[in-house]
Image: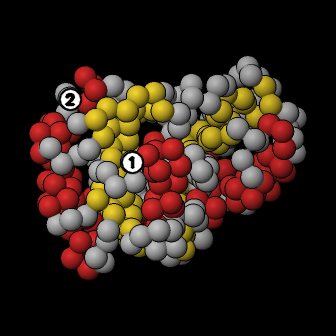
Amino acid sequence: MGSTSFESITAYFPEKLRKLMLSIPATLLEDLTEIRLRTAGPVYLVYSDRILYLCISGRLSSVYNESAYIVGASVIRDIVDRLCHFSVHSCTKQLSEGFFVIENGVRVGLSGAYSSSINPILTEFTSLNFRLSRSVDGCAEEIFSSYYDNNIMICGGVNSGKTTILRDICRLSGNLRKTALIDERNEISCLCKGVPQRSIGAMTDVISNISRSEGIVSAIRTLSPEVIVCDEIASVDDSEAIINGIGCGVKFIVTAHGNCFTELMKRKEIIKLKDSGLMDIIVFLKGASAPGKIREVVRL
């Protein structure tokens, strides 16, 4: 992880906690994936293969004990105020969806109690998860070069690297042809103040904060894309929009959650795509032990 992302995160922390975090050696930040804080609980750093707890001395420990830095409710509230730029009322959308996107593509998830209003928002906060966004330029070259003109579905389990692979495919495609990215939850481009925080291609148009199916329809109607990229197909509406888009001559590169073909075929939206005969290949990733690595390619 680059220091810029870490500094972006710690800039939202109160001074005492920020100083402790900045004292962590750079060598312990390289493979960091998440920083989590919990009210009356610890600050802990999540890696692909381990978890380390922040101690009151500033060192990191693999064991959670009395030496751990314990987060007070005021610390969580202070960080949320900073995320809202001290104007909670201007951030009702983020507080209703439960996440923020900040500089350098860092995604911040919130948990807590929602209001009982018609349009509920988080009003009490119990934990924060700063999730780092990674760009690994070149990680998708094998898939992209081998299946350039195909409709592709990339599949894998949690932390298998689907989003990272998709981001790089978007970059590669967007540097060669008109590409539309349907970024429903702003996880691929990581838009911040209208500017993508990740490299997604010179000719890539981004549609964010709208459902995948609506975004696909909008892109086809208004942007004349040659390729549409979208993450985590999750409904029959998504599948129908993709099928209609392919019928309009657009190529699709999508992801779906699933470790194997049998697991995928338990989902009606994926069955619908398969039965359409329009998807060409499914790429299965190895999993969390080897993020972004291909295990198998299935031709449909």
- Determine the residue positioned at 74% across, 22% down: 62
- Determine the residue positioned at 21% across, 65% down: 249
Q: Amino acid at mark 2?
A: Met
Helix, strand or loop at mark 2: loop
Q: Reading the chain from its start, which is encountered first: label 2 or label 1?
A: 1
63 w.r.t. 281: above or below: above
Q: Please indicate whether residue 32 sits to the left or right of residue 300 in the image.
A: right
Q: Which residue appears farthest toward the bottom when viewing the image?
A: 222
**How is colour applied across the structure in the image?**
secondary structure
Q: Please indicate whether residue 292 sits to the left or right of residue 62 in the image.
A: left
Residue 81 placement (x, y as % from top left): 59, 63
Disc 2: which residue = 265
Disc 1: which residue = 147
- Comparing 243 with 117, the one in front is 243
- Determine the residue positioned at 23% across, 46% down: 279
Helix, strand or loop at mark 1: loop
How far apart in space, not on screen, are marks 2 and 1 (Cα)? 22 Å
Q: Label 1 crowding class (10 Å Cα cut-off): few <14, some 14-19, many 20+?
A: few
- Comparing 169 with 34, the one in front is 169
Q: Name which quarter of the figure residue 44 lies in.
A: top right
Q: Amino acid at mark 1?
A: Tyr
